Image (cartoon, rainbow, N blue to C red):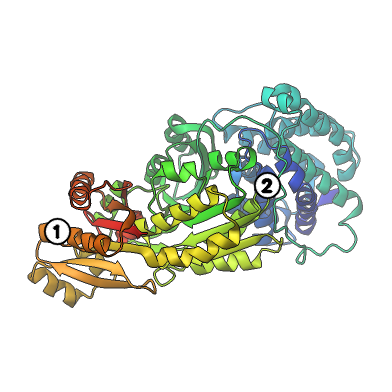
Amino acid sequence: MSGLDGNQIYQAFYAGLLRVRAAQDRLNHINVYPVADGDTGTNITATLSHALESAQVSDSAGETLASVADGALMGARGNSGIIFAQFFSGLSESLVHAREIEKEAFVRGVENARRRAYEAISNPQEGTILSVIHAWAEALRREVASAPTMHELFSRTMPSVRHALEHTSEQLAVLKAAGVVDAGASGFVEFIAGAERFIKRGLPAGTSILGAKKKTRDETSDVHGGERPVFRYCTEAMVVGEMIDREALRGVLEPLGDSVIVAGNDERARIHVHTDEPAQAFASIGAHGRVIQPKVDDMRLQYEVVHERKYPIALVTDSVCDLPQELIDQYQIHVVPLHVLFGKSEYLDKLTIDLERFFSLAEHAEVFPTSSQPAVGLFTRLYSFLSSHYESVIAVHTAGKLSGTYATSALAAETLEDGKKISVVDSRTLTGSLGLIVLRVAEQIAAGRSHDEIVAEIDGYSRKADLLVGVHTLRFLIRGGRVSPLEGVLARALHLKPIVSVDEAGASILYGKALSIRQNVSKIIEMTARIHAETPLRNYAVVHGHDPVAANEFAAKLERRLGFPPLFVEEISSVAALHSGQGALCVVAMRE
């Protein structure tokens, strides 16, 4: 084979994907750098899968490469996945007009891809996938003149690539301590080894490109040791615009953390950063274009699941559950974020947008923001990961009548075929009331109760949970469609301040109304006191719409009336704020 046309380059890449997919568990197992979160194999497989499944294949090698590069950039996941995407982008950039790729052009393309991969990273580190890419580019340049065919060129350069891979364990102390090579580098070697096999012998017998079975579970239970992440969140997104300044993007991200990568082109840039401030990262990159495909992974929690798991049962909820972060961390609760949409820009609730920014954007938005539940694929990946490390999973979600999150989570749990027990429960409530239910489940898990015993009691917890929301402005309820404009005009004319709750089925209801904010607060306190008199409260809490002063005053009044303090005072999620608005005060309670 002297050259590769569009169909052949696609099939070579597909053969590479098959090798990576087969090695996925091993790559996860040896993943210790830059963070020992056990997902490098999963991320590379996901990136390559998206690139090839979305590609438009033609006879032209340049057109096919451009399509693969585009798909890789859109679907890139994780540090290594984004470097793969940038490698494809650099290869395509050099070969965009090629009908068929000959040896010499291919070598030039790989050299350009190598250069682009290094340029994408703020602090290139040897001993990683970059070292293997560099070694391959050097070996290709040495051998291209004497190698008679494309296969011979690949074959002659593989020893150099494998030597570079083995050398990574000497280049990075963390790899040497763990006794492994770099997982991303190993994934790249598997990829080009698969491509070499195709060029020599074609695809393996019986392979169907369209019918290849995807993995549904990540076998990562024996991940090697590694260092605890310095920064908490692996933050990624796509920035879409015109003449995107990638250096400027890198400049705003570098002060926020490490592992900064900015890949792509002038119209689309994929960003990656390890940071403790994902909301600040998104606020910074938002000035450079429209932000889509946000993804934030809690690397610290992933590390704890792999190395420091506390309990045999995993607990999952969603971001409408308003619990303080210290309680979420204490019980290792997995929180799946809902999406908040401002026009075409996407944010992840509580991760890439906080309430201050939410209300600022909402104040000036031409179109009122909306929310959407997480994609089923996100739950599928989460449950696959958790099933690899826990005996079972319990998920408790916001009311199914108010959000599609419960249904999506349940669908993902049903489709996972690994035999692990996953129970998905509709709490029939939201915000801090959901938080108290989740907290009670967490306490039962920590106490060593069985999966079935806990699940059997959650319905009772929901019936014992109370929620009273004092709404200070009707503007959000009207714009969000919960109150009609006519009702809103009448209510404002009468200066009504509604009190909102949820019924036993989880639907929102008007629970009462007052003529002023002061009366509103007083009514809620008296309602709570009556509940406590009828059935003593186990605990209660205050959540609020970005008004900590009023919330603390409210909490103090409740404490004087009830005789004991709230469990916590916490801001509501942006999704809840879509309807309750700024300044809302809410008491949530759990009866004995």
* Residue at the image point whose x is 52% and y is 55% from the top: 316
How crowded is the residue under tag 2: few (<14 C-alpha within 10 Å), some, or many (20+)?
Answer: many
Q: Which element is circle 2 on? A: helix
The residue at which mark 1 appears reads as 522
The C terminus: image quadrant? bottom left
Gap between marks 1 and 2 measured at Cα: 56 Å
Looking at the rendered structure, the number of numbered marks drawn on it comes to 2
- Residue 234 is situated, as x and y percent measured from the top left of the image, at 53, 41
* Residue at the image point whose x is 43% and y is 63% from the top: 461
Left or right: residue 470 compared with residue 214 = left
How crowded is the residue under tag 1: few (<14 C-alpha within 10 Å), some, or many (20+)?
Answer: some
The residue at which mark 2 appears reads as 44
The answer to which of 363 and 277 lies nearer the viewer is 277
- Residue 24 is situated, as x and y percent measured from the top left of the image, at 74, 47
Is residue 202 visible in the rendered image? The answer is yes
* Residue at the image point whose x is 19% and y is 70% from the top: 512
> Is 262 above or below relative to 65?
above
Left or right: residue 47 compared with residue 538 = right
Q: Amino acid at mark 2?
A: Ile
